[in-house]
Image (cartoon, helix red, strand yellow):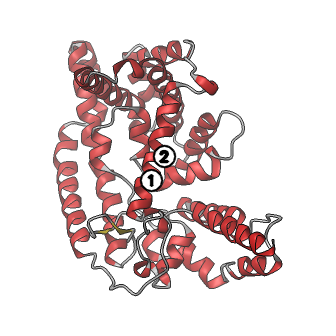
Amino acid sequence: MMIITQKITSLAYEIHDGMFRKDEELTSSQRGLAVRRMPSLLEYLSYNCNFMGILAGPLCSYRDYITFIEGRAHHRAPPGASGKEDMPCERAEPSPNVAVIQKLLVCGLSLFFHLTISKTLPVEYNIDEHFQATASWPTKVVYLYVSLLAARPKYYFAWTLADAINNAAGFGFRGYDENGTARWDLISNLRIQQIEMSTSFKMFLDNWNIQTALWLKRVCYERASLSPTIQTFILSAIWHGVYPGYYLTFLTGMVMTMAARAMRSNFRHYFIKPPQLKLLYDVLTWIVTQIAISYTVVPFVLLSVNPSFMFYSSWYYCLHIAGILVLLLPVKKTQRGKTPHENVQLSRSKQCDERENSLGQNSFSTTNNVCNQNQEIASRHSSLKQ
């Protein structure tokens, strides 16, 4: 049900912001072209109820889905020297066999770890009375991290298997990289290496449940005029369900995210150079991030109120208090009112956009491309009129 809700809102977003842009520059013929892009009833039901995505997902945009259904995904040419996508060309359909085999191997390892290690290291042991009474603080910290590390493979198994099934059907082809190798990560839902090596809360969230995070970004974060981070976390909690542990996790995650953002804005620019100092900073932020993530998601696993508060009280709510104290600190501003962290993020995002354009990633990904195409068509028509 949640996946269908996601798909309906995603489709509505695409129709509103891509297919039916009512720019004054659009001519009646262009609007007629937009109307013809309106999905038929069969296309609408096919997108929302397709067998591969209705159970475990992952969520995909309507544009990506219909491109795959119509068999046009592998006909796209990579971007040219200008960075714009060239005209479609005939191209042999790439084989997903290698990608599917690799993802099935990841599934097997994840399932093995889940059936063995996660039972040996249960998350519930963090609130065991004997453990709380006898274990030292370093032992509690290490066990918290290891037990939550052991709880993640079941998610790795489910999402990677869903991704492999879609790839086996031919869905998920993103394009070719600079070496001409086919990429099958269009609808991938996680990046395991980046998750385990995250040095910030944002880096973890950007690589965990990727398609749902993109959906939340499009329908909430980019549209919210007041406190988009808070609104997005609240919507994510509501979307997950009614267990109290979900709400405790996302409320805690909201505090941790904003506190981590403030810390990086205030201090990260002092540790960029020399490389040895940057390495030390990365190691410290990795340790802090992994502990903070584990501390945050314990209620997500325990689900109930009493066990969750039992855990947090055993830790004296220390990270909650630390996060709130950090939020009380002033955040340094740079020119144009942006924080150093925001400036770094903007420059990185520009570099990522250029790299993605060179790899042809933006050929299929989001409906923003539809918006850009409509604007480009409108500008061309206006120039022709002149």
- Which SS class for mark 2? helix
Name the quadrant containing residue 203.
Answer: top left
> Residue at label 1?
354
Q: Are marks 1 and 2 in contact (CB under 8 Å)?
A: yes
Looking at the image, the residue that sits furthest to the front is 386
**31 versus 358 height, above or below:** below
382 relative to 275, above or below: below
Q: Quadrant of residue 111?
A: bottom left
Q: Quick one: SS at disc 1?
A: helix
Residue type, numbered disc 2? Lys
User: In the displayed structure, does residue 22 sit left or right of residue 220?
Assistant: right
Q: Which residue is mark 2?
A: 350
Residue 317 appears at what percent x and percent y? 44, 16
**135 or 211: which is nearer to us?**
211
Q: If the image is split into quadrants, where does the N terminus sit?
A: bottom right
Residue sitting at x 57%, y 22% = 334
* Position of 169 relative to 213 (above/below): below
